[in-house]
Structure formats: structure tokens, C-alpha cells
Amino acid sequence: MSQIPEFKNYIGGEWVAGVDQRPNINPSDTSDVIGLYAQADAAQTEAAIAAAQAAFPAWASSTPQQRFDVLDAVGSELLARREEIGRLLSREEGKTLAEGMGETHRAAMIFKFFAAEALRCGGETLASVRPGVSVDVFRQPVGVVGLIAPWNFPIAIPAWKIAPALAYGNTVVFKPAELVPGCAWTIAEILSRTALTKGAFNLVMGAGSQVGQTLVDSPRVKALSFTGSVATGRRVIAACAARQAKVQAEMGGKNPLIVLDDADLDVAVNAAVQSAYFSTGQRCTASSRILVTEGIHDRFVDAVVAKLKTLKIDHALKAGTDIGPVVDQRQLDQNLRYVDIAKKEGGTLAFGGEVVERETQGFYQLPALITGTTNAMTISREEVFGPVANVVRAKDYDEALALANDTEFGLSAGICTRSLKHAAHFKLHSQAGMVMVNLPTAGVDYHVPFGGTKGSSYGPREQGSYAREFYTTVKTAYTFPG
Ligand code: NAD
């Protein structure tokens, strides 16, 4: 039997063993152990925070060219190794290879975008209201930032936190999700070979209760960027606010997709199937709540079921697989529990929902479509985070819009229609942070802001040039030449 590779944490420019190790297991084949990854405790996390603090003066005063060179080099290497890293991503998270490679490509572009942002980040000069005085407004790095990521985008989410943090001159302690340390470690390894100041980037793998909580509570961590569940996010927000640290949290969704009578049926089916079920529905932007007007309802449901019947659910790395496995047993149990609740509350299982077996032992589930639901049912209110979507009938556009907004979440929302009037109205009146017309509800462009409203998000937006709101602090300087 070949030796299982071991991976260490990266602290202060050194590779450091943890206090324990955790196996990284392939959800497509649980006999495949990708590696044993170091697990830090609170003390090791504190050491990483200290390293980031020590590196801050040097990296904060680095030139835009130095920052560009580091981030651009990471982007170039991710692009060159897109297939290899995409394969690792698929192996540890369960996305198909095409999705894994696509996500790696996106991460590369994010690094390249923020490489150039380092050069673009300027301030402004204004005349004062007092004669002879001028006012400069400029941005400075915040300090040590803690970055906490979920498991469902193992490379894109780390990229969209690490790249802006470093681009604007901060130093970083990054904690990936327990289930997907492989891509995180790969980014750390690439960064370790760049000209980045030692200690400016630290990778600390381990449990949320140890590593995550230490980052949240440490007074030396000046800003905390979190993506994950609502339950954890709310605790993180409260703890950071209590000690006056900057905090940004991107959390769950119950994203509506409206399908109006005048929609192009193929466009609507494609948008629904893509956003509800691809990436195994494990997306915060998944359209898990589909609101369909009377005139198209039955045709739409029939067409979605017909499409779902054609999809191949199998090993993420197998050629021809459309949808890979669920990430682990706990998430699979949660998906099945929600399907069950939906049926008990009066929904009809129009397709799928059950566990299926494949050649390898993995967490395979057929995508579930539940019809005959109302917006008041549990399935319409709570995030499942799996390949499970429900359909709610709506009388007309007005009712569909009201239903779409009747949720505690506000991440993403979509509408399929050929009516310019309804599309324009929806873009204005949807309460979500990201709104799509005739497209899946995922927010994929890497150069524009990403984030939501209501219970889904807290703090400034991530991605695009808007990321600087979180990763910098504004200084106002008054000068009188004397
Ligand atoms: P999670 O909340 O369980 O974990 C997220 C991260 O927080 C992990 O790294 C975890 O170890 C860490 N953590 C756990 N306890 C902590 C604590 N006490 N202090 C600090 N950190 C702690 O979420 P998950 O299951 O990894 O991810 C799924 C969730 O993420 C879903 O709700 C999904 O909607 C959400 N998500 C949101 C976005 C977005 O941008 N809005 C994107 C992707 C995923």
C-alpha cells in the first residue's frame, strides 16, 4: 500500500506539523484518502497570528509592483496547473472535473484581478473649505486579517479572500474548511515560493471551534472575513462586533427563481437545473425555491423532470458525470431529512431524492424535485444545501415577486421571462443582493461585487474593486503648507 501523503500548516514562512492530523476523504470513493492534513490548536493559531503581526509593517509598506508580482505569479501558476488542481478539487469536494477546473480557472483570474487592483488602489485630493488647506483621502491596510472559508468552493472562496487581503497590504491567517484542506494547502505552497514577505500569509488548518474561534476572539486580528452557515456566521459577527473588529460574513440563501408564463421554456429549464442541481446543489446561490406561474407550471415541471432523468450522477472524476456526490454523510443525511419533511408537510416528490449506489462507495443522491409546495413550508424557508429544489405555484408576476421576497435570506434571485417590463421591475424590486434575468442564480463573474442582503450577508461586499471597502481603512489627511 502506498504511503498516504502528509501536509503541514504554514506559519511564519515555515512548514509546521499540527497537534493532530485529519484525513481528507474523497466523497466519490471513501476508500480514497487524499492525504493527512495537520490540525492546529488554539496555541498554534496564536503563533500564526503573531507571525502575521510581525510581518505586517514590511508587507504594508511593500510597493504595488511587489504585490502585483506575487499575486500575478499565483494566478499564472493556478492557470498552468488548472487540470491538476481541478482534479484535486473534484477529488476532495466531489464537483465534476469540469467544475473543478472551472473553479480553479476562476481562482486564477481572481488572483490576477487583484494583482492589478494593487496598482489601481488610489485615493483622492479635495480642496478644503478653509483657504490654503488641502485634504487627501487615502486607503491603508487594516492589519492582520483572519479568513475563514466553507467547504463548497475549496479554491475560489479562499482566492477571493486571500488575494484582496494581500493586494491591499494586509497580512493573513487563513483557515480553510475541515473537509477541503487540499486546495488551500496548494495555494499556500504556491505562495511560499513567491517573494511574499515571510509571515504575511499563514495557513492554519483545523477545527472551527479551535482555529476559527481563536481568530474570531484574538484582539490582534483586526478584520475577520467569514463565509459559511448562518448559525456560525451570526456568532462570528457578534463576537467581532463586541471587540470592535471589522467583520464581513457571507452566509446562506434560499434563492428564488421565478419562471413566468412568457419565459422561453428551454432557457428556464436550463437556468433551474443548472442552478438548483449542478455542483450537487451545494452552492449558497443555488435556486432551491422555484416560483412558477400557472400557465407554464405543468410544462415546466415535466421538462425539468425529463432533463433530470438524463443526468448522470456518479464519481466526480468519471467522464460523462453531470453531478458528483454529496460532500459527506452528514450533508447527505440533512438532504434526505429535508426531502422527508417536505413530503410530510404535503409536497409531492416529482423526481429523485433517494440515495443511489455506484461502483465506488460514495455519497450519491438523485437530485430531488418537490412540487405542490407552498412558501410557508419548511422546504421553502430553510437552506438545504444539496441537490433539492421545490416548486411553488404563483398566480402571476406580482404574486411571484411577493413570494420571492418573502424569505429571511437575500443572497441571489432570478427571473425567466421575455418581458422587459417584468425583468426591469424585478431587478429593482427583488430584495436579493444579486439578481439574474434568464440566467442561473450563481454569481460567477470575478470582477464584480458578490454578496447579499437580509440574513444572507453582513458587512461590505466581497470581490471586484468593492472588496477594498473591507480590506482597507480610509484616512483623511489635512495639509496647510504653512
Ligand atoms: P460552517 O458555518 O459550518 O463552516 C464555515 C467555516 O467556519 C468552516 O471553516 C468552519 O470550520 C468554521 N467555523 C466553525 N465553527 C466556528 C467558530 N466557532 N468560529 C469560527 N469559525 C468556525 O459552514 P459550511 O458547512 O462549511 O458551509 C456551508 C454554508 O456556507 C452554507 O450555509 C452556505 O450557504 C454558506 N456559503 C455561503 C456563501 C456566500 O458567499 N454567501 C458561499 C459559500 C457557502
Image: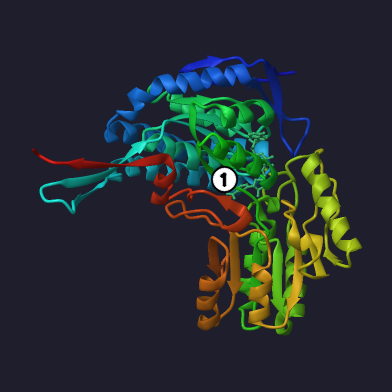
Q: Residue at x 41, y 47 (%)?
A: 469
> Looking at the picture, does residue 102 appear above or below residue 380?
above
Res 175 quadrant in image: top right
Circle 1: residue type: Ala
Could you tell me if residue 105 is visible in this image? yes
Question: Residue 41, position in %: x, y?
Answer: 65, 20
User: Residue 451 vs residue 315: left or right?
Assistant: left
* Label 1 residue SS: strand
Q: Is mark 1 within 8 Å of ligand 1?
A: no
Q: How many marks?
A: 1
Specify the farthest residue to the left: 482
Q: Is residue 422 above or below residue 384?
A: below
The C terminus, quarter of image: top left
Query: Residue 123: image x %, image y %?
Result: 26, 46
Q: Quadrant of residue 70?
A: top left
Residue 318 in view in this figure: no
The residue identified by callout 1 is 249
Q: Report the side of 153 relative to 24 (left or right).
A: left
**Res 411 → quadrant:** bottom right
Residue 376 position in % (x across, y down)? 79, 67
> How many residues crowd around disc 1 within 10 Å: few (fewer than 14), some, or many (20 or more)?
many
